[in-house]
Image (cartoon, rainbow, N blue to C red):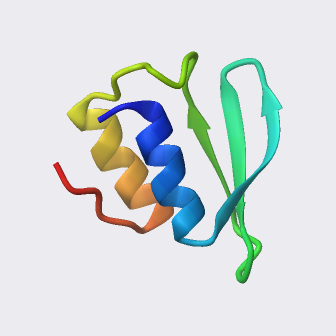
């Protein structure tokens, strides 16, 4: 799964990008105001399974593989 696909899923689930410093993109949930970080260099970068599992845990989501 590409980084831009994960960002699209996050945005559909109420997360919006609030801050970016280098490769660290900080997202904030519009209802709970929780903040989480997703680090990637390029939107076309392939995100590995281990990182996907960690993102699912951090953002409390389930990605389809």
* Residue at image point 45% right, 33% down: 3
Residue in the picture at 75% in, 18% down: 22
In the rendered image, residue 1, in percent from the top left (x then y), is placed at 29, 35
Q: Please, is residue 28 above or below residue 8 in the view? A: below
Q: Is residue 32 left or right of residue 38?
A: right
Q: Quadrant of residue 64?
A: bottom left
Residue visible at 38% across and 66% down in the picture: 61
Q: Report the residue at 51% width, 51% height from top.
A: 8
Count numbered badges in the picture.
Answer: 0
Residue 43 vertical position relative to residue 64 in the rendered view, above or below: above
Spot occupied by residue 53 in the image (x, y as percentages of width and height): 28, 48
**Where 28 sits versus 48, above or below?**
below
Residue 59 point in image, percent of width and height: 49, 61
Seen as rendered, the residue at the extreme left is 65
x then y, percent, for residue 15 = 64, 63
4 on left or right of 62: right
Q: Is residue 2 left or right of residue 17?
A: left
With respect to residue 51, does 62 lie above or below? Answer: below
Picture quarter containing residue 33?
Answer: bottom right
């Amino acid at each position: 799964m590409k980084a831009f696909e994960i960002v699209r899923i996050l945005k559909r689930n109420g997360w919006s990008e609030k801050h970016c410093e280098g490769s660290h993109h900080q997202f904030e949930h519009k209802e709970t105001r929780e903040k989480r970080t997703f680090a990637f260099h390029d939107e076309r970068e392939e995100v590995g399974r281990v990182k996907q599992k960690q993102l699912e845990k951090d953002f409390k989501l389930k990605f389809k593989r």
